[in-house]
Image: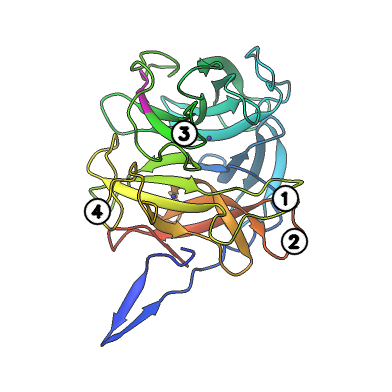
Amino acid sequence: MKCSIIIRALLGLLTTTFVAATPNPIAGSDTVVVRDPSIWYNSGLGKYFVFSTDNNIAIWTSSAITGPWTNVGSVLPSCSIIDLPGNCNLWAPDINFIDGLYTLYYAISSLGSQNSAIGVATSPSMMPGTWTDLGEVISSVTGDVFNAIDIWLVMGWDISSWSISWRERSGFGLFIRFFFLACRSQLIRSYFKPTPGTHLAGYSGRPAEAGFVYKPSSQPYYYGFFSDGITPLIGATSRPPAGEEYKVLVGRGADGQGPFYDELGNEITLDLDPPTGTLVLGSHDNVYAPGGQSIFADPVSGRDVIVYHYVKLSDPIGGPSYLGINYLDFSSGWPVVVS
């Protein structure tokens, strides 16, 4: 697996308060059909790479973040070597560069199932045909207290760390959990804290998922992003009530392991009304139900970038989701979507 629709940017002028309009996605990506996108840059090739759910992790490339984007193939066109149903339907990629290799995590599961696994593949370039599937990192089965999906890797400590989200058996809500992973020359799979790890966001009954922890170079804080609400799927026949659709929320904390707090000072694991989490990106203009986000430090522009998927409000219900890319500004201490 990937960070304002009435974003939290409030500009005070004398006694009048104005709400800044949320910028639309950067031009050039509104025809790129994706879910759960993750982005990286290969400086040697001078190309951006976007990876997404479906097509055994689809690969899109562009020489500029503004596109145009070209679908060049898949990470694992012959499916994953993990022996699980769904191993030709890979989800939620997360891409990083570790020990000289581009390292991509992916999930195998099916809707409503706990029979899931997280796998990992590596490549020297990210181009199709260069990926080596290293197989399973961790898995879950029916009855476990977690579901092995939605991984992201957090770099910057003495050892690498990563998290998955898991579904509590007694409710719908996804809890975001945290584990340690040893970083060796090939990276890969060992030394986990015992499951279920550390609770970072969400609570039983809350549709919270797609966690992503990011530390911008300009801030002392770690930011815990997550998607909250109902995500529209292809083939849906209706949309959720207004305000219950997907949106990107965030909390921040002094440590990448949490706890994370929203702007009101509430820990984002708490069951409160209104729900915890500071809004980063929600529905606006023709952008509906944005989420499945990841955050990226763009080495070309020197700016922080959020990538996500969204549905076009003008499209018929049940249509596809598209790639959204925006810049983030953390200068206020909170992530704000900007032009």
Going by the numbered disc 2, the residue's amino acid type is Asp
Q: Which residue is mark 2?
A: 315
Residue drawn at point x = 41 percent, y = 58 percent: 279
Judge left or right: residue 40 versus residue 267: right
Residue shown at 38% from the left, 16% from the top = 184
- Numbered circle sitting on residue 320: 1
- In whole angstroms, how far apart are the C-alphas of marks 3 and 1? 26 Å
> Residue type at mark 1?
Pro
Q: Residue 321's spot in the image, x, y percent?
A: 67, 51
Residue 122 figure quarter: top right
Sort mark 1 into few (<14), some (14-19) or many (20+) by Cα contacts within 10 Å.
Answer: some
Q: Find the distance from the CA under tag 1 to the CA under tag 4.
A: 36 Å
Disc 4 element: loop
The residues bearing labels 1 and 2 have C-alpha atoms spaced at a distance of: 9 Å
Range covered by the magenta-colored residues: 178-182
Q: What amino acid type should be assigned to the residue bearing mark 3?
A: Asn
Q: Residues within 10 Å of mark 4 (few under 14, many from 20)?
A: few
In the rendered view, does 296 fall on the left or right side of 149?
left
Question: Disc 4 versus disc 3: distance between alpha carbons?
Answer: 31 Å
Q: Which is nearer the N-term, disc 4 or disc 3?
A: 3
